[in-house]
Image: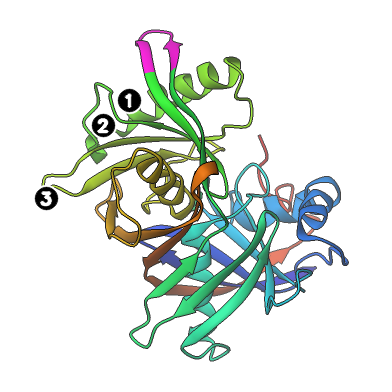
Amino acid sequence: MKRISVLDSHTGGEPTRLVLDGGPDLGGGPLAERAVRFKNEFDRYRSAIVNEPRGSDVVVGALLVPPHTAGCDLGVIFFNNVGPLGMCGHGTIGLVASLAHLGRLKPGRIGLDTPVGAITAELHADGRVTITNVPSHRRAHDVVVEVPGHGAVRGDVAWGGNWFFLVEQHAFSLELAQIDGLVDFTKRLRRAVNAQGFPEVDHVELFAPAPSGVSRNFVLCPGGAYDRSPCGTGTSAKLACLAADGKLAEDAEWVQESIVGSRFTGRYRWLERTKGAIAPTITGEAHVCGEATLFLDERDPFCWGIRA
Ligand code: PYC
């Protein structure tokens, strides 16, 4: 019987399962290569750790690996119910809070290597975490797609460590009571965006003002779950669009609320204004909520999780 020990946390309601021991050995090399190795050779570990019956579609796993990029202290590969993620903002905040809980981190800054580049994370004395994400940018502005059953929808394609289609004008109210309709609409929208020349887009993000006046979002994740947090990579993509449109000044604060009411605070710094490249910073907090040893018993027909 294999045993995998994990520490669970949530960041604004979105779970992160940190693998502490018993995960696959992905060897060395750049993290992008190791993420491919994880997908091609060890996918059953991914499924066993985050999928049912031990997890759910919402759980994001975090596998710590030795870093490759100079200056990084740790490497991490995030993964969900369908595969590895490029980066994960809520997961990074959860990872740092988990390492602090274990006494492995003190307040201060660390460098983290990910499959899409190096980032930094700062643990504050009060437990909040600020990440400086990978350079983010808007790739396409005001793209119009025809969504079956909904008509024409306009949005932007932007990178924030994952690829997003961001939409401000839509007919939905961003409330938990509307989840079924939101998931259905954003899945159709993603298919339409993918078919229209953006096959890389795997997250869809809708925006509307919250009753308090701050921006609220709804984020559809690659495997069909919705993000309970405001989505760190999605907020980074949003900051890239706001910067490109001149709607938010450098270093001004942007509060992003999630569909469940949790919040991140974002800011950005220009990296290369002519290319629209920014360095986004996202601040949030995570709470450790469990620790467990997963048993992988080959006699169990669902030992490696339920895979679609
Ligand atoms: O916070 O970046 C994020 C994220 C991506 C998918 C789920 N959360």
Badge 1 crowding class, 10 Å Cα cut-off, few under 14, some 14 to 19, many 20 or more, is: few
Q: Is residue 302 visible?
A: yes
| Residue 296 screen position, x and y as percent | 74, 62
Q: Could you tell me how far apart the alpha carbons at marks 2 and 3 are, in whole angstroms? A: 19 Å
Q: Are marks 1 and 3 in contact (CB under 8 Å)?
A: no
In the depicted view, which residue is nearer to us: 42 or 108? 108
Residue 278 location in percent, x, y?
49, 53
Count the labels in the image.
3
Q: Disc 1 and disc 3: Cα gap in Å?
A: 23 Å
* Picture quarter with the C terminus: top right
Q: Secondary structure at mark 1?
A: helix
Q: Determine contact: label 1, label 2, CB under 8 Å.
A: yes
- Residue 170 at what x, y percent from top left? 28, 23
Per the image, label 2 sits on a secondary structure element best described as helix
> Is residue 303 shown left or right of residue 216?
right
Can residue 159 be seen here? The reply is no
Residue in view at x 41 percent, y 62 percent: 282
Q: Is residue 96 above or below residue 276?
A: below
Find residue 268 and report its horizontal and vertical position in percent: 40, 58
Which residue position is annotated with label 2?
178
Instruction: Find the residue positioned furthest to the front.
Output: 274
Report the span colored magenta.
144-153
Give the residue number, with chain letter if any, for mark 3: 212
Q: The disc labelled 3 sits on which kind of residue?
A: Ser
Q: CA distance from mark 1 to mark 2?
A: 6 Å
Label placed on residue 181: 1
Q: Quadrant of residue 167?
A: top left
Q: Nearer the viewer, residue 62 or 296?
A: 62
Q: Residues within 10 Å of mark 2 (few under 14, many from 20)?
A: few
